[in-house]
Amino acid sequence: MNPISNETKPPSAQKIRLLVEIPKHPFVLLVVGAIITSLLVPYLNSKVTRSQLLQEAKLKKAIEIGDHNMEFNSKFNALKTMLESFHNRSVRLQLPPSEFRATHSRFVDDFYRRYVELDEKAWWWYPALEREASVLHLLSDTERQTLSTECKIYHDNLIASFEVLKPLWVALTSHDYNPTDKDSDKKVEEIIKGVNKDLPPLFQERDMAIEKIAKHFVSAQ
């Protein structure tokens, strides 16, 4: 009896060659290539799409940051101009007391409305920006920490800017404000000089802070 059965015989050289040659067959290579392509291409396309969407989201945020600052500067400067113009106009017109009180009341109402409108928008967007950057993973941990520092600088700048403008508002709404009185006029003019001296550096500092905040999103990979 043959000690080696048919089931345990080693494969012949012909079978071995066949097994080696099959993977080299053009049809097999075509099938394997098609399978790899069907798996790899969608994956790569998905990676590219996610990267593009992320970059577009960052660029959109950078533009929004600049828009928020432009809106604040415009409305804040309008408040400043409104205060100065009211005083200059009151001094120039020298209105009778009754007419001045009516004009002054309308001015106070208009100013307060504009102030509240600005106050509602000035403080919310940069805390929201920090939350979005964290939740959506728009920035790395290190970049988010730097962003938080820059947002704090911007926040402190807003407070300082309102504090510079506040004395002028207080002076024009005080009970002893009288544009027909030279001493009252001189007092207000001194405050206006101080406002015009202190605000420009704050505007520049704020613009620099905004540039740095926006740059986190433009340069981030």
Image: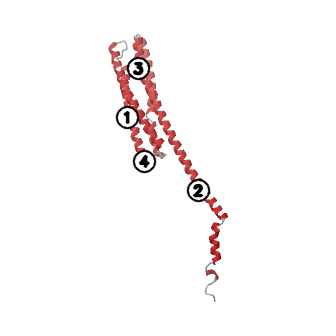
Residue on which disc 2 sits: 40
Q: Circle 4: is it few (<14), some (14-19), or many (20+) Cα within 10 Å?
A: few
Q: Earlier in the sequence, mark 4 or mark 3?
A: 3
Residue on which disc 1 sits: 156
- Foreground tag (2 vs 3): 2
Residue 84, numbered circle: 3
Q: Is residue 194 left or right of residue 45?
A: left
Q: Earlier in the sequence, mark 1 or mark 2?
A: 2
Instruction: State how far apart marks 1 and 2 are (Cα).
Output: 50 Å
The quadrant holding residue 170 is top left
Amino acid on which disc 1 is placed: Asp
Amino acid on which disc 2 is placed: Leu
Secondary structure of the residue carrying numbered label 2: helix
Q: Is residue 23 left or right of residue 149?
A: right
Image vertical order of residue 12 relative to residue 180, above or below: below
Residue 141, numbered circle: 4
The quadrant holding residue 102 is top left
